[in-house]
Amino acid sequence: MAPLLAPIILLMSALPSGLASDGAAGPYPPLSDAASAVLGDVRSFADLRPCEATSAELARYGPDDALAPCLLYDIRDYVPAGGEESPGRRRDQADEAREDRVGSDHSTTSASGRELREKAARSLESEGTAEVALVQVTPSNCNNHRDGAVTSVRLLNSSNAGRGFGIGYRSAGGVSSGLALGREEGDRSVKFRLVSIVGGNPANVGNDVFTEVHVFLLDSALRQIGNAAFILGSCSFASSADKPVALENRKVVLSQVGPPGFYDPASNPYVFGIHVNSDTYPLPALSALTFRLQAEGRATSTQQVRALYRDRSEFFKSTCESAVNAATERGFDVTAIEYNPDGDDDGDGVPNSQDDEHVRALADRLCPPSDGDGTPRGTHHPAIFACVNQEVDVVIGRLRENGCRPVSAWFTTATWGWATANPETIPYFQGGGQWHENFKYGDEFFETGQAVLDYGLEEYGYLGNYDHVVSYAMPMFLAKLLQSYFRVQDSPDVAASLGDGNYEIIRRHLMNINVDTIFGPVSFNEYQRNNGRGAAGTQWIPASSVSSSSSRGSNEDSGEGETMDEATVFKQGCVSPLDQANTAIVIPSPSSSDCDAGSYVNGLSIESEPALLATKCAACPADTFTALPSSEMQCAACPEGSSTMDESGSTRCVTVEQNLIGGLEYMGYVLVAISWSMSLGYLAWVMLNRKNSVVKISQPEFLVMMCVGAMISSSAIIPWSNAQASVGGDVDAASRNCMTWPWLYSIGWTLMFSSLTAKSVRLNKVATNSMNMQRKTVNAKDMYFIVVIVLLLDIAILTAWTVVDPLQWTRSVVGTSVAEAGVVTIDSFGKCGSSGNMFAFLGPIIAVHVTLIAVTLGLLWKVRNIGDRYQEFKYVAIASVYICELLLLGVPILVAVQDSAPARYIVITGVIFLSDTGVMAFIFLPKIKYAKEGLPEGMTVVESMNLPSLKMSFKSIIQLMDKRLLSQGKEIEKLKWEVKRKDEELCELRNKTSDMSKDVWGIESQMEESKRPTLDEHAFPLPT
């Protein structure tokens, strides 16, 4: 904001005679040569030429763009193209209106043009419509401050079929009926004439030169425009030039300036501020902090409030000082840090505001890395108020480096373009301003201020900011002022009332008015400041927490309005005034808040993440925990013997009683080795003694199969030993082992017993043939199909089990207990289980195995009389009884120890081992014994087999043979008789054949005779 020039200007002498014209005189300093050069041939308002660029185009002028003073708008009449209908709230009707830029037929700057305007004014008076001129001078870049007024004046002048807004007692109820024109003849109305002058480009000529030109042009316009009654204030940094002119010409200026120091009714009673007091910007944030402390039962003295602000700007200085004063009154621990942005405290030739080292030192005072008393980094939670400008990035960067976690941060830049340009930094930042898009204040033409901006986007080609809304509200406010002033008069004389003699009454009336505008309620306090409502308190809040659907952010003195992408996570919510708020204020900030249980304050996040106020909490790493919400910078390590089971973000450590088998699996591996050794030993014995009668008659092929089956069955102990998983272990591997060991055990057992079955079938056939005195060969290959069929049946059941409902490793909690703070002991139990009914598959397998045993025993029963050296019925029966005893003993124990993994493991492993080794021992040990003993002396192998045929006497054998021979003799005699009979039949057949041959010969002879020719001795003479 430029320095205030009013005190200097008021002490200067009159305008130089060389530039005085048409009443342009007053207590102003002589124009400098630079100002005169800018004005050129413009000696008064009447000499101004129309601007060649639009308002939006002028706003884009840069330092290299020269601009001579020009007249941008001179609007004094605005009638819709339709003639009768007012545009009301409809934008399209305003679009139909005539363009009132300078250069139209009714807007000229020549002497004849003045005459035409005066004639038009007289014509309006004759029609009962008075004209009141509003004058404004702005720099080129202040398009928002002037274009909103253009919209307002156009709509007001087009009201009531183009007759303007009504005034007086008879105008349809006066004030209560808004801007409507009365229904009776003689009711008076008012139209505004808006004279908007662009004084030049300060970026090109400098602020001081522009100020001189501004004063000259505004004074000249007020003196030359006879019905000029009010000044519309310029943009804030140029507004100081309005004050001396308003005082000299005794005309009210509605200034668009926030700081209260700008206003002093004692020295200049004509300056009124339509802006709310900018000193109130930070107060909603301070009030929210106070309420929070009260809710927590904490004294305000326990909370640090630290403010950093410039001392060379009325806005920055007074805004943050208001926060300091309010915090001091409320008892906060306050630290004010005031600095000169233009000074050079360290003498390095760099202004303080641009000296990064100096700014970092200021930030250290805001939030130091430590207090020098051992306070760790990241534990400071001051409430920060910063009235800064371009140095904001350095300040925030230093706060991050210091590990600062403010409870709140109110920055002037939070509502400026800087905020929308730094979306990663601004979460939860608070700010203040004049207006917010969520405000629901409206008027006769627009429902909200946002609607004004949307209209301006279509009309002027840019999306304005809050200054556009204020500019629009000023003519509307003045219209209501005039309506209020004339509300009890039957025939108001506007010109006389606004003349020099009565103008003071209008000014005093202004001091006591209270009206509603699209900018909100407007009324003035003793300092002639608008105190109709509070400032707009804002905070950047997660979009999901903001009720408004709009994605635009409001900006304070930041040029054209900034917008936010709809996808932006954070948007600028309105937190005050409460009746206009669309979100609740978030305080304390997530950064300063305690982290939830299971998390801690991450120091790395504090220093590296750009969002100063966003949460700095991180989940506790594995094997660490926090049981309660806290601000600890690290999590507590789990006590020895406990863990978080590889999970992060834990609120407790866990000691799990996993009920694993421990080292018992090594016992299982030893048992497997013993079983394999025995099986391999038996196998080796078979191979070495394969020519022994005991081995040959026991069929070595099937003995080998039994050894292999026993090894496969015993191998089931290996996956069974690994069918377990610790908490957090490989459950999939455990589940695979759960299903693998039934496969191995069942297939091995089936191969072992099906070999016995096949061997028994073969032995049974041999014995039967021997009993029937039949010599038949029964090959081992013929018996393999029995083994194959049984194995295929077993595999089919196991495959269906695996596909449909396989065994899975599951762990369930038996109970929990708290051993100490933060440590919980969980008693869990894991086992192989099925989601459905496991016996749907286990039952058929058991049935197959039982059937196999029964068939084998049945077959062996038939050959039970074979000699003890070779028969197996007794030993297989003993083995079967042995297996049943194992099951009868093991199953009840297994049921009793279901919740004890070691006991369950021992029982099942023992059953597998004992059943395999027991069966093999019962089969092989007797054979080894008899093979070692050899045949009894004097007995052949056949005799040793003790087959039933050998027990018969020799006589019985002879008798049997005689019977068979006799039977065979009878058969032979029968066959001889049959042969004799056949010979006789053959002889008779031969005789018949001979007779038939003779008959045939006779017949043939006769036929030959009949064919022989008769000789005619007369026809054929005989030779001589």
Image (spheres, helix red, strand yellow):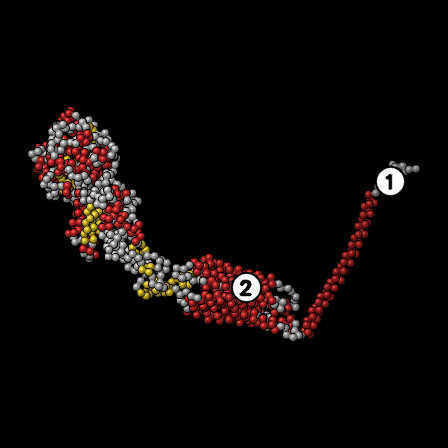
Residue 1021 place in picture, x, y as percent: 89, 37
Quarter of the view holding residue 319: top left
Q: CA distance from mark 1 to mark 2?
A: 107 Å
Q: Nearer the viewer, residue 451 or 645?
A: 645
> Of discs 1 and 2, which sits in the foreground?
2
- Does 274 appear above or below 994? above
**In this rendering, would 558 be left or right of 262?**
right
Q: Residue drawn 44% across and 67% down?
A: 664
Residue 399 place in picture, x, y as percent: 26, 50
In the picture of the structure, the residue carrying the numbered disc 2 is: 708
Residue 547 place in picture, x, y as percent: 25, 47
- Residue farthest top in this picture: 112
Residue 850 place in picture, x, y as percent: 51, 66
Q: Disc 1 marks which amino acid? A: Leu
Q: Disc 2 marks which amino acid? A: Val
Question: Which element carries disc 2, helix, strand or loop?
Answer: helix
- Residue 436 seen in the figure: no
Q: Nearer the viewer, residue 53 or 245?
A: 245
- Within 10 Å of disc 2 (Cα), the crowding (few <14, some 14-19, many 20+) is many
**In this rendering, would 685 be left or right of 376?**
right
- The disc, 1 or 2, on the residue closer to the chain's N-terminal end is 2
Quarter of the view holding residue 678: bottom right
In the picture of the structure, the residue carrying the numbered disc 1 is: 1015
- Within 10 Å of disc 1 (Cα), the crowding (few <14, some 14-19, many 20+) is few
Q: Residue drawn 12% across and 31% down?
A: 15
Quarter of the view holding residue 302: bottom left
- Residue farthest left in this picture: 501
**In this rendering, would 462 be left or right of 484?**
right
Q: Residue drawn 78% across and 56% down?
A: 990
